[in-house]
Amino acid sequence: MPLLSGKNRLSLGFSPCPNDTFIFHALIHGQVCAEAPNFAEATLADVETLNEWALAGRLDVTKLSFHVLGHLLDQYVLLMAGSALGRGCGPLLVARENFSAAALPRLTIAIPGKYTTAALLLQMYSPVALATKVMRFDEIMPAIVAGEVDAGVIIHESRFTFQEHGLLLHQDLGAWWERETGFPIPLGGIVAKRSLGKEKIQAIDRCVRASVSFAFACPEAGMPYIRQHAQELDDKVIKDHIGLYVNPFSLDLGEEGVAAVREFLERGRQLGVFPRNYSGLPLTSKEL
């Protein structure tokens, strides 16, 4: 459903995961923000697809992994609202059996996309070369159970259900990050094309913040829409998912959130993951 009729509508993309549908429900259904730019109907896709589309410059405003943002800072700017960032919410490295850290290089590990934050976080945790296999996030646990891979990095709702599949936790990568840096783990954010200009970008940011505020104030309003797109239909799983990934950082990154993103990007640069240093560019909409 378009927010407003008119020409030159902006393209918008986010994931079908409960945290994103919770955040965007009010905005895309016209329940907030009279100043909203002309958005076309939202496109929902898994995070790695969104990452690949961002690399191709396909969407004007999109959710993406902070990993891929390190490749695109000359094209996109991070909004202060809408991010998934926090404590106790990072990706998990799980397996059928226990293994030592020294055994990691001998294993085949499934990752939920080449450009996901989970993939870069695994590389930070174990900088030695690892054998990884890219899979869609919801295919990883079945592949581990079936013996197609030895272990996997799981995200989203899988965090709440892996034990039901008989899997064991090897490392909470978010907890490792928090111990290493003292920062919350930055998972994904909402970005806008720099070419839209400061005024429009900051208006979009205000509208995303208004949508998050509405969702916090009226959490049941978007539940039919959230259930429509959720991988796990159990209401407790959905609400636990939202409670974990949507928090005060989703309203506004603040100084701590921005510092966490900068730390993540800098560590990626130190690993040689990002081809260029974009330190001279404004990172966020607030800095424009």
Image: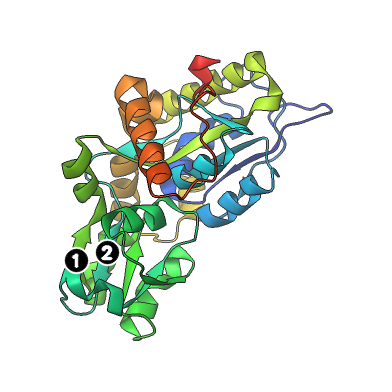
Packing grade of label 1 (10 A; few <14, some 14-19, many >=20) is some
* Residue receiving disc 1: 169
Please tell me in which quadrant of the rendered image residue 130 appears.
Answer: bottom left
Q: Mark 1–mark 2 contact, CB under 8 Å?
A: yes
The mark found on residue 93 in the picture is: 2
Decide: is 60 above or below 171: above
Give x and y (percent) for residue 264.
Answer: 36, 39
**What is the three-letter code of the residue carrying label 2?**
Leu
Give x and y (percent) for residue 101.
Answer: 18, 68
**What is the three-letter code of the residue carrying label 1?**
Leu
| 43 relative to 256 in the view: left or right | right
The mark found on residue 113 in the picture is: none
Packing grade of label 2 (10 A; few <14, some 14-19, many >=20) is many
Q: Residue at x 19, y 35 (%)?
A: 182
**What secondary structure is marked by label 1?**
strand
The image quadrant where one finds the C terminus is top right
